[in-house]
Every structure is written in structure tokens, then in C-alpha cells.
Image: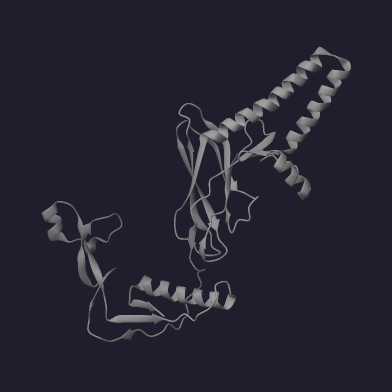
């Protein structure tokens, strides 16, 4: 279980953070850290008043631990490079998969006890799960799964993040701010499609669309990829080229569905529900690959 951080009033906590922050670094004192600091001050006061050499030696060792903790934690944070990458599509109010990559830039020394978490000093639009790595080997990269939740659709900045460590003694939590990441595109919240879908409009002569489909007229050939259906193999081309080749099909142009979206303002609940309804119908139609979609 991780060591709890001592809770202090909000105004005092902000003052402490400003005092303990410099060059993108922030220092937070844990409960054990406060106790150790008080004990160090008590030993130092006793050493001054008594003049005992043993107390002076203990006080010096305690101060060395505090200084050494700062030096080692700073060395740890400097050697860690972090990147957070989306591993799939992101829908509003749904956890989306994220891969957090921690790379140790030092080819000789390991990195111990590091975590990546959201930066609470910023008003982040969403939340990403924190991840923790016990060890990142010298020159190695560790990839950890996490989940990102964004409240609304649209293009939003990613939550600001920090890399943190309690190494080596757990007396302090040192954090380093990470660079601002690229914005993410958030799709509408997924809702069940309406059971009464609009009828498909059919009419006009067949025409080519240039759009791939799961069945229909042959669109072209491409190399076989893992997961392709074996029935789509084009055996003459496979025998001629000496490697598996599959057929791609073109969607027909005679079927067309018009999706109606009433004008509205982003963020208004009624308009957002309408967007979710249209998106659900579009996703269902595209999944079936049954028609060409138009939005008006």
C-alpha cells in the first residue's frame, strides 16, 4: 500500500507548492517525510544544546538522507521519457484505451518506482488512469495500459500529466511536468440505435462509388493480411505471384440513406441527444455496409 500524503488546508497547500516548485518540478512531503523532518529538527536542537558528538553525527546523517533523497529522485525523473498514445477510438463518457510508454534513457542504470498521473494543478477536461512501474530496465521501454475518459464530444486537449516518484525513501513525492500533448478527437456518446430505422431510398442507375465493401463488385486486389477471410482469396493471382492475394469489393451506388440532423448549438442537451441519435444510426448502417450515407 502506498504511503499517504499528509493533508493540509487548500490555501496552505498552494503556498507550499509554490515554495517547493521550480523549473517544472514540484515537491510534496508525505506523512513519513513530515515525521522525519520533525525528528531531524529535534535531534539537531538536542545536539546544539548538549554538544554530544553522537547527536551531531545522527543529525548529519539525517540531513544527508534528505539531501540524498532529493538528488536521487531528480536523477530518476530526468531519465524517464513518457508518451501517452490512444489505442482506439474515444467516445464521450466512455473509457478509451490508452498506452502509456515509459522509456529509460539511461543505458546503464535502472529506474525504480515511477508513476504517470494527471496534473491536478490544471483544470483538465477529462481523466486518465494513473499507471505505476516498479522498474524500468536500463535502456528499456515499458508499456502500460490505461483508460481515458472525456466528458463531451469534439476536439479537446488531453489532460495535463506529470511523472512522479517516491524513490528512494518515500519521504517526498517529486513530480515533473510533461509537455503538452496533441489534442484528441472525441466521438459522440454511444447510444442504442432507434428500432425504427428510416427506409433506404433506392433509385437511379447503378454507379460506381470507389468505396470498399465486404461484398459486391470486385474493386481490386491486395496482399493477404492476418484475419482476412479465406473465401476472399484470389487463387489465380495467388498462384501467379507466389503469395496470398485477396479481393476487395466495391459498394454499390444504388442504395442511399439520408440522415437528418437538425441545426443546433454544441453543448445544448437537446442538440447533443440528436447528434447521438444520428451517430448511432450511421454506425449501424456503416457496420452493415448496406447503403451510402448522406447527412443534411
Q: Tell me where residue 19 appears, x and y as whole percent.
A: 72, 39
Depth check: give the residue in front, 9 or 1.
9
Image position of 125 (left or right of 170) = left
Q: Is residue 76 above or below residue 127?
A: above
* Quarter-of-image position of residue 74: top right
- The residue positioned farthest toward the top in the image shown: 53
- Quadrant where the image shows the N terminus: top right
Q: Residue at image x 53%, y 49%?
A: 180
- In the rendered view, how is the structure colored? one colour
Above or below — where is 75 with respect to 133?
above
Left or right of 166? Residue 133 is left
Q: Outermost residue toward the right?
A: 49
Residue 234: x %, y % from top left: 17, 61
Q: Is residue 195 above or below residue 12?
A: below
Whether residue 256 is visible to the viewer of this picture, yes or no, is: yes
Residue 210 appears left or right of 193? left
Amino acid at each position: 500500500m502506498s504511503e499517504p500524503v499528509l493533508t493540509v488546508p487548500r490555501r496552505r497547500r498552494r503556498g507550499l507548492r509554490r515554495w517547493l516548485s521550480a523549473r517544472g518540478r514540484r515537491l510534496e512531503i508525505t506523512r513519513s517525510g513530515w515525521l522525519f523532518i520533525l525528528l531531524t529538527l529535534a535531534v539537531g536542537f538536542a545536539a546544539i544544546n548538549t554538544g554530544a558528538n553522537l547527536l551531531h553525527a545522527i543529525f548529519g546523517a539525517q540531513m544527508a538522507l534528505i539531501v540524498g533523497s532529493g538528488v536521487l529522485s531528480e536523477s530518476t525523473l530526468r531519465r524517464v521519457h513518457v508518451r501517452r498514445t490512444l489505442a482506439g477510438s474515444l467516445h464521450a463518457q466512455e473509457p478509451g484505451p490508452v498506452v502509456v510508454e515509459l522509456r529509460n534513457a539511461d543505458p546503464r542504470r535502472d529506474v525504480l518506482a515511477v508513476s504517470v498521473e494527471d496534473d491536478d494543478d490544471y483544470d483538465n477536461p477529462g481523466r486518465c488512469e494513473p499507471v505505476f512501474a516498479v522498474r524500468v530496465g536500463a535502456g528499456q521501454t515499458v508499456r502500460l495500459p490505461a483508460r481515458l475518459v472525456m466528458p463531451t464530444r469534439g476536439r479537446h486537449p488531453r489532460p495535463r500529466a506529470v511523472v512522479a516518484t517516491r524513490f528512494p525513501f518515500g519521504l517526498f513525492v517529486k513530480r515533473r511536468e510533461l509537455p503538452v500533448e496533441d489534442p484528441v478527437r472525441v466521438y459522440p456518446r454511444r447510444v442504442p440505435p432507434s428500432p425504427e430505422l428510416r427506409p433506404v431510398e433506392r433509385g437511379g442507375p447503378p454507379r460506381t462509388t470507389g468505396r470498399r465493401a465486404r461484398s459486391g463488385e470486385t474493386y481490386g486486389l491486395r496482399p493477404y493480411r492476418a484475419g482476412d477471410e479465406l473465401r476472399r482469396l484470389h487463387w489465380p493471382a495467388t498462384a501467379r505471384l507466389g503469395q496470398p492475394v485477396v479481393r476487395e469489393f466495391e459498394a454499390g451506388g444504388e442504395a442511399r440513406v439520408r440522415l437528418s440532423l437538425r441545426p443546433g448549438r454544441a453543448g445544448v442537451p437537446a442538440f447533443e441527444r440528436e447528434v447521438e441519435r444520428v451517430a448511432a444510426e450511421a454506425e449501424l448502417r456503416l457496420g452493415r455496409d448496406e447503403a451510402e450515407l448522406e447527412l443534411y
